[in-house]
Amino acid sequence: LVFPDRAAKALRAYLLQRRWFGARARLGPDGDAGAPKRLAVIKGLRVYEAYPEPSFPKRDDESDTTGAATLPGSSVGERLTSFVLTSLDGDVPPCLPPLGSLDPDPALLGPGFLRVADPEEAHVLETCLGVRRVSPASFLETRVLARLDALPPRALDDAMLEALRTLGSLTHHDGEIR
């Protein structure tokens, strides 16, 4: 079943609410959406927004082609990204970006990462639907350090500044980082 973008967004906003899951939902007439059969249906819907595969220019400048376009009359930092609709039940299920990054730079992400609209949606995806959240240390290692030569300068600078800002917690949670 294929949904237009607008319908997918509306359905996702409706489904990804805490009130449909857990003890309080079981008391209602429709039951808990966390029942295994219902979870399978919710996970199988192609209504979840994943980031597009980033592609970068060959020359050494700050422009990128991550599927993002600058909005007319907006500053350079404001981009409109074309997201890809996906389901949660594929061979390699998508994951959530590290905590604290509701709107991360699309250049650091790709189809394996879901875009979340708000903290409630992230909570339901993570706790009720079992979507894994990537740790900041793993994200730094696999999406930044492993791709130093490929990332646009602005995305790389922002990621490295964030790593320096959170270095204490990164080293505390991951002994491999020194």
Image (spheres, rainbow, N blue to C red):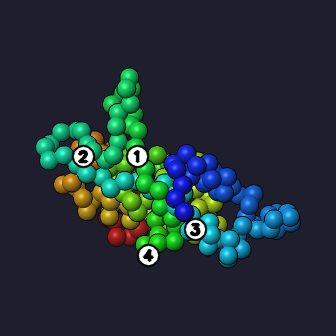
Sequence-wise first label, 2 or 3: 3
Label 4 vs label 2: CA separation?
30 Å
Residue at the disc numbered 3 = 43
Query: Looking at numbered disc 4 in the image, what kind of residue is underneath it?
Result: Asp
The residue under the point 58% across, 56% down is: 122
Q: Is residue 10 left or right of residue 78?
A: right
Does the CB distance between marks 1 and 2 fall below 8 Å?
Answer: no
Which residue matches tag 4?
91
Q: CA distance from mark 1 to mark 2?
A: 18 Å
Q: Badge 4: few (under 14), some or many (20 or more) residues near its Cα, within 10 Å? A: few
**Which of the marked residues, 4 or 2, is nearer the chain's N terminus?**
4
Crowding around mark 2 (Cα neighbors within 10 Å: few <14, some 14 to 19, many 20+) is: many
Secondary structure of the residue carrying tag 1 is loop
How many numbered tags mark residues here? 4
Residue type at tag 3: Lys
Report the mark closest to the observer, 4 or 2: 4
Q: Secondary structure at mark 2?
A: loop
Q: Which residue is mark 2?
A: 152
Label for residue 82? 1
Q: Quadrant of the N terminus?
A: bottom right
Given contact means CB atoms under 8 Å apart, are the residues at marks 1 and 4 in contact?
A: no
Residue situated in front as seen by the camera: 139 or 34: 34
Q: For the residue carrying disc 1, how many other residues have a C-alpha within 10 Å: few (<14), some (14-19), or many (20+)?
A: some
Comes first in the chain, label 3 or label 1: 3
Q: CA distance from mark 1 to mark 4?
A: 23 Å
Q: Secondary structure at mark 3?
A: helix
Q: Choose mark 1 or mark 2, whichever is in front.
A: 1
Mark closer to the chain start, 1 or 4:
1
Q: CA distance from mark 3 to mark 1?
A: 21 Å
Q: Quadrant of residue 19?
A: bottom right
Percent from the top left, x then y, of residue 46?
52, 61
